[in-house]
Image (spheres, rainbow, N blue to C red):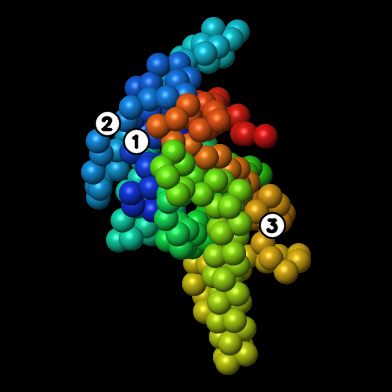
Amino acid sequence: TSLVANVGGASNSGKTALLHYLCNAKEKETTWNPPMTVTSLVANVGYVCPWEDTNDNGNNGSMTIRIIDYPGHPSLSSQLTGLLLPSATSRLVFTLDATQPVTVGAALLYQYILTHSQVRQSWVSEGKTLAVLVVCTKNDVKGAKNYKRMKIQLRNELDKLRKVDHALNESSVSGDGNSNGSSKVMLSVKGKTIDLDNLGSDVPVSLHFVEAGFGMDGVKGGLAAIHDFVLEAVVPK
């Protein structure tokens, strides 16, 4: 049997390095030297079997995880949603470069996951939740932001996008009595800002955050947390 885990995010945010780590590192290595990678317009695919508990009552012995590293180039972003349906994936690793602004990554997350009608409706109809592990990469690089700061910046950027959408939607409805009929659905909030820990019952997505870097002991276990999420569906606490 096989499960699928996707790795998505903006270009140059460390997706392919994580794919190599998951497929090639031995056990739960917390330090690892990734190979040099280049920007690609083609998805990379790897296969891996869980390293531990393969004889757990025979449940995991034949399990294979198929990992798809999807390119972050803007010209390919619209095709990402097809890989995020419950029939196509079991979970998603979403990378954010901790040394860079979150603008591009936030736009991807907002447009193709959080407000995409097909993605949201498909998970709701299945009665399931899309688990997303947001990995703040390159955290071993000088000047990188920790995941708490990245989470705040991501929330602020998502709020900006949400407010623009609501303004455009209200303008469209008031002008002709109908919304624009796009594939996007609104992201509602109860308070003044988005709560990334609780996106609401109508958004079947759960976000979890870790920071990681290959240069220093996995940055407090970040690499091990990614391994556990992808191979064993364990979300960090």
Give the vertical position of 102 relative to 132 (above or below). Answer: below
Give the vertical position of 143 relative to 58 (above or below). Answer: below
**Residue 195: image tag:** 3
The answer to whether residue 47 shows anywhere in this view is no
Lower sequence index among marks 2 and 1: 1
Lower sequence index among marks 3 and 2: 2
Q: Nearer the viewer, residue 236 or 179?
A: 236
Pinpoint residue 156: horizontal percent, then vertical percent.
59, 64
Quadrant into which the C terminus falls: top right
Is 41 on the left or on the right of 217, as rendered? left
Q: Which residue is mark 1?
A: 17
Q: Which residue lies at the image location 68% right of the left edge and 50% below the top edge?
A: 197
Q: Please, what is the three-letter code of the amino acid marked with disc 3?
A: Asp
**Residue 74: image tag:** none
Q: Please, what is the three-letter code of the amino acid marked with disc 2?
A: Pro
Give the alpha-carbon distance from disc 1 to disc 3, as whole Å: 30 Å
Q: Nearer the viewer, residue 194 or 47?
A: 194
Q: Nearer the viewer, residue 114 or 197?
A: 197
Q: Which residue is mark 2?
A: 35
Lower sequence index among marks 1 and 3: 1
Pinpoint residue 89: horizontal percent, then vertical percent.
48, 39
Q: Looking at the image, which residue sits at the far bottom? A: 175
Task: Report helix, strand or loop for mark 1.
Answer: helix
CA neighbours of label 1 inside 10 A, class few (<14), some (14 to 19), many (20+) = some
Task: Report helix, strand or loop for mark 2.
Answer: loop
Give the alpha-carbon distance from disc 3 to disc 2, as whole Å: 37 Å
Is 159 on the left or on the right of 226, as rendered? right
Q: Looking at the image, which residue sits at the far right? A: 190
